[in-house]
Image (cartoon, rainbow, N blue to C red):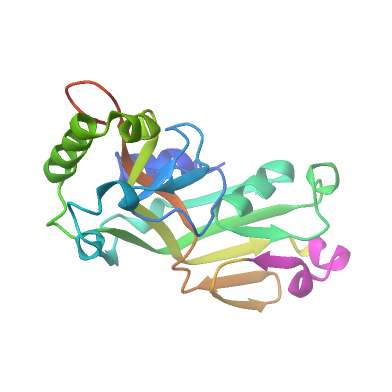
């Protein structure tokens, strides 16, 4: 079995994998914590001013990683989890009915969306430290949350399903995603392209009350 998660973490050492892809997780999102990847708000309302909205502009580019090792084979509930990690769902299939499910996933293009270089960790820490000094109540709302600085997307990937599955379900009507993507199927292979809204992982910092406001 290909250990996709380990391969991704080797390729992108700062990566925090998400358990469920949702479109509200973008640079500037505040997650419940490093381990609970539920979006609870945004950083901008706390830092505008002194920053303005243009400070939080982002850019997107291909991730500098070797894609040949980024593949996985899963079956049963593990296959369901893999689909959810990349923003897909098989309608009507759950953990108790997933025994016939077996897939192979190959990542073909990974992109990263991140703040422009002008918004550095140093600038953010200085602004958060100033917020802590002038408005400790607002700063306490941020404490222990995880600030997302960059999001990683499987922009293009390929799924190969075990052929027996096609006899059991109508894959065209059952395979769903909330992403704005292009999905094409030929026999038991599905190509997903132009996913720019559902990230599989993030890079960011935990907001703390210590001397170093942003902790890796």
Q: Nearer the viewer, residue 6 or 182?
A: 182
Q: In this orientation, which residue lies closer to the viewer: 153 or 191? A: 153
In this view, which residue lies farthest toward the top? 210
- Image quarter hosting the N terminus: top right
Tell whether position 166 is magenta.
yes
Q: Is residue 117 above or below residue 108?
A: above
Q: Position of residue 158 (x, y in %)?
A: 54, 66
Quadrant where the C terminus sits is: top left
Horizontal and vertical percent position of residue 128 = 21, 38
Residue 168 among magenta residues: yes
Residue in the foreground of this view, choosing between 148 and 170: 148
What is the span of residues highlighted in magenta in the rendered image?
A: 164-177
| Side of 104 relative to 102 (left or right) | left
- Measuring from the top left, give residue 205's x and y in whole percent: 30, 36
Give me the residue at 84% from left, 66% from top: 169
Q: Residue at coordinates 23% horizontally, 31% vertically from top-left?
A: 132
- Position of residue 130 measured from the top left corner of the image (x, y, whole percent): 16, 36
């Amino acid at each position: 079995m290909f250990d996709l998660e380990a391969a991704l973490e080797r390729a992108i050492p700062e990566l925090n994998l998400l358990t469920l892809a949702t479109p509200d997780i973008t640079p500037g999102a505040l997650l419940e914590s490093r381990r609970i990847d539920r979006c609870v708000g945004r950083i901008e309302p706390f830092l505008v001013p002194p920053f303005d909205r243009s400070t939080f502009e982002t850019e997107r580019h291909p991730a500098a990683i070797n894609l040949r090792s980024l593949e996985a084979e899963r079956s049963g509930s593990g296959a369901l989890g893999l689909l959810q990690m990349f923003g897909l769902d098989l309608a009507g299939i759950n953990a108790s009915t997933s025994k016939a499910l077996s897939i192979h996933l190959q990542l073909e293009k990974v992109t990263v969306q991140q703040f422009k270089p002008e918004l550095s960790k140093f600038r953010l820490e200085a602004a958060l430290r100033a917020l802590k000094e002038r408005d400790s109540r607002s700063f306490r709302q941020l404490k222990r949350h995880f600030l997302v600085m960059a999001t990683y997307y499987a922009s293009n990937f390929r799924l190969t399903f075990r052929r027996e599955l096609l006899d059991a379900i109508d894959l065209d009507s059952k395979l769903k995603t909330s992403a704005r993507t292009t999905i094409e199927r030929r026999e038991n292979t599905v190509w997903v392209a132009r996913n720019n809204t559902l990230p599989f992982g993030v890079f960011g910092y935990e907001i703390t009350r210590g001397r170093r406001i942003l902790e890796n």
